Image (cartoon, grey):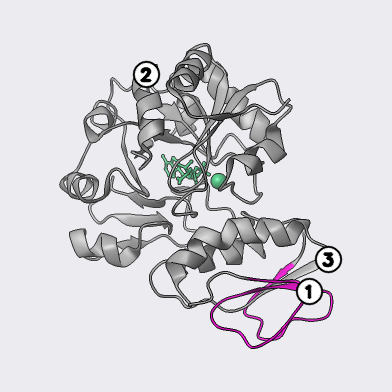
Amino acid sequence: MSPITSITEDALTQASQALRAGRLVAIPTETVYGLAALATSSQAVADIYSLKSRPEFNPLISHVSSKEQAEQFGVFSDQAHQLANAFWPGPLTLVMKKKPECFISDLVTAGLPTLALRVPDHAQSRALIDLVGSPLAAPSANPSQGISPTRAQDVAHAFKDDPRLAMILDGGPCSVGLESTIIDVSTDVPTLLRPGGLTIEQIQGIIGPINFYKDGGGISAPGQMKRHYAPSKPLRLNVAQPLEDEAYLCFGPQNHTYQHSLNLSQKACVREAACNLFYMMRSLDQGPCPKIAVQSIPMHSLGFAINDRLKRASA
Ligand code: TXA
Ligand code: MG
């Protein structure tokens, strides 16, 4: 049985009932598909961790339908207001101190005094959050460390027969294709914890210079694991010429004719490459070659986040 469901009013009602009953629902967002549960229910959130085999010290993002709803749970600094006003709904997650009255489960925040909040740029998922009447905790809907899902079928491939997942809402392919950019705004100078679908240039354009989180620099970004977003096959980066046993993930105009090759963007557009990255990594992972080689991708704009994902996928 495949629980992939087109999004209708009925489907949203059914999904909201399932969530309120403590079950999991996969939801589309502009970045990647999320595996959602009622953020106030420890039992439901515990199912997210077990279904994904995710370590419980790695906290989850709470998805809300508006900035007003976010303000019920988190303490907004001036910079948090500026960023939320500029980029919500959109691929930006803000980490801020929890309000004392915040009733989101401690399992969502992994016991931290801070909370990650985001308003997804997907009208139907925001409508679902409103129907449920509570924030939804949602990590990417893939087994821990695997490739993130950008289509409903990717979620079904991983989880379709698990009874904990009530349904997969099909909102079509994700328009951004990379996870949200995460900024910690709980400190005086905001810190980038994870590059993602919103560029650093866009963020600095609103709030000026920010700090950059460094791997090994403490527990403030518990999810920044070295190996992540990984295909099952070995991945080699910055390759100009693939070996015989390697499928080739290339970027920009090409004059070769490798048989097992996919192009992230013929016209060398990093935004298009971001959108194709996980889908193409997944296709090559399922293809006949035992290894994957990737051409170098420029570091500008979304290229920074693409290179972050590739580095972790190859670790
Ligand atoms: O685009 C996205 O952000 C997607 C969609 C579904 O919204 N979600 C997503 O969730 O990527 P996930 O669980 O794969 O990544 C959440 C990241 C983790 O790296 C986690 O460590 C970090 O958010 N995080 C959550 N709460 C945090 C906190 N209080 N402090 C620092 N990092 C936090
Ligand atoms: Mg993830």
Circle number at residue 131: 2
**Mark 1 vs mark 2, CA separation in Å:** 47 Å
Residue 265 spot, x, y in % from top left: 53, 72
Above or below, 34 relative to 165: below
The residue that mark 3 highlights is 290
- Amino acid type, label 2: Leu
**Mark 3 vs mark 1, CA separation in Å:** 7 Å
Most foreground residue, 102 or 1: 1
250 within the magenta span: yes
Q: Residue at x 65, y 44 (%)?
A: 154
Question: Which comes before the other along the chain, label 2 or label 3?
Answer: 2
Q: For numbered disc 1, what is the local secondary structure?
A: strand
CA neighbours of label 2 inside 10 A, class few (<14), some (14 to 19), many (20+): some
Q: Are marks 2 and 3 in contact (CB under 8 Å)?
A: no
Question: Which comes before the other along the chain, label 1 or label 2?
Answer: 2
Q: Are marks 3 and 1 in contact (CB under 8 Å)?
A: no
Can you tell which quarter of the image residue 270 is in? bottom left
138 within the magenta span: no
Q: Residue at x 29, y 28 (%)?
A: 73
On screen, residue 160 versus residue 243, left or right, reads left
Residue 185 spot, x, y in % from top left: 28, 48
Q: For numbered disc 3, what is the local secondary structure?
A: loop
- Amino acid type, label 1: Glu
Does any portion of residue 142 appear in the rendered image?
A: no
The residue that mark 1 highlights is 246
Above or below, 133 relative to 177: above
Does any portion of residue 162 appear in the rendered image?
A: yes
Disc number lying in front (2 or 3): 2
